[in-house]
Amino acid sequence: MQLLNIFKSLDISHYIYLSTVLFSIGMFGVLFRRNAIVLLMCIELMLNAVNLLMVAFSEYMGDAQANGQMFVFFIMVVAAAEAAVGLAIIVMVYRNTRKTDVSFLDSLKD
Amino acid sequence: MNSLFSLPLPFLVLSFITILCALYVVTSKNPVHSVLALILAFFSISAHYVLLNAQFLAIVNLMVYAGAIMVLFLFVLMLLNLNKDSEPVKSKIWGIAATISAGMLLLVITAAFQKSGVAIYKGSADDIGLVKNLGRVLMTDYLVPFELSGILFVSAMVGAVLLGKRESNSESLLDKGNS
């Protein structure tokens, strides 16, 4: 069941550029934002950019064993675990400092 | 490379929505708006997966990301009462530095892709993204990573519960700092 053969009219480079733009936006968010929850969301965005590129390459290379899609599957697993632990850490930090601002978390510096 | 508007319309529309939502995620002052925009971005990425013949992954992406992880984010935002503008105003130099850094990352990666040769399209394999095929591969070739990810999930759950548990008889860091 093939809905649409997208690579008949499209090159893999378009997906490469789309994923690169998404990854750069996530990178910009990680550098720019100070709210720890938004930071985690930017990391999710970067992971999704990588996932999209992996699925695109899996389709493009005629991957009969679905290796690329399996890797996306495991990246999702790791992302879910990471989000759970990260949010627990943020809740703990908030309980101790009443803030989720990462620029206040510099007590290891002194 | 042909011009931008000769590309297929679904790809163009979905990419436009994805990039717009991603930009709104990083620029919105209100964290709740960021979460909602990110959910929309995940929906459009799922639509991309359908275009790329990964139907099962599209559904899993919706369930895991838009359904579970984003609801978790939203709950934490609501519980911590951060659903308003709580971010302090920063100096402009941070924005400029972040823009330059991310732009240079974009430039370097695209320049590297320009120089590299692109492999020839080998033709897509049919039915590869359906649950029957993926389940067979997961249970044969990827059985050990599958079990390991189960262990990872258990340890992540234990860690999250342990971190999130309120310590009853120890004063918080804030009180220590004030006294």
Image (tube, helix red, strand yellow):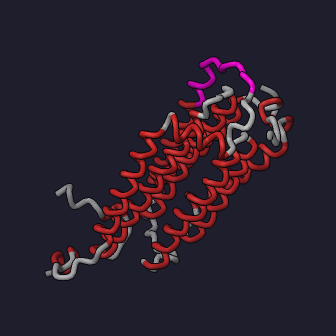
Q: Quadrant of residue A1?
A: top right
Question: What percent of the width, then of the height, locates residue A86?
Answer: 38, 60
Q: Nearer the viewer, residue A28 or B45?
A: B45
Given the current orientation, which residue lies at the most extreme left position?
A: B179
The answer to which quarter of the image holds residue A89 is bottom left
The correct choice, above or below, for B123 with respect to A45 in the image is: above
Rendered residue at 59%/40% (across/down): B136
> Vertically, is B12 above or below B171?
above
Identify the residue at image location x=40%, y=55%.
Answer: B153
Q: Is residue A103 magenta?
A: no
Name the quadrant of the C terminus of chain B.
bottom left
Q: Position of residue B69 (x, y in %)?
A: 52, 62
Residue A81 position, x and y percent, is 42, 56
Residue drawn 60% across and 19% down?
B116
**Residue A72 position (above or below residue B35):** above
Q: How many marks?
A: 0
Q: State left or right for residue B142 relative to residue B28.
A: left
Q: Viewed as shown, does residue B110 lie left or right of A84?
A: right
Depth check: give the residue in front, A50 or A39.
Answer: A50
Residue A103 shows up from this direction? yes
Image: magenta residue range: B110-123
Q: Is residue B126 left or right of residue B68?
A: right
| B52 vs A101, nearest the viewer | B52
Image quadrant containing the N terminus of chain B: top right
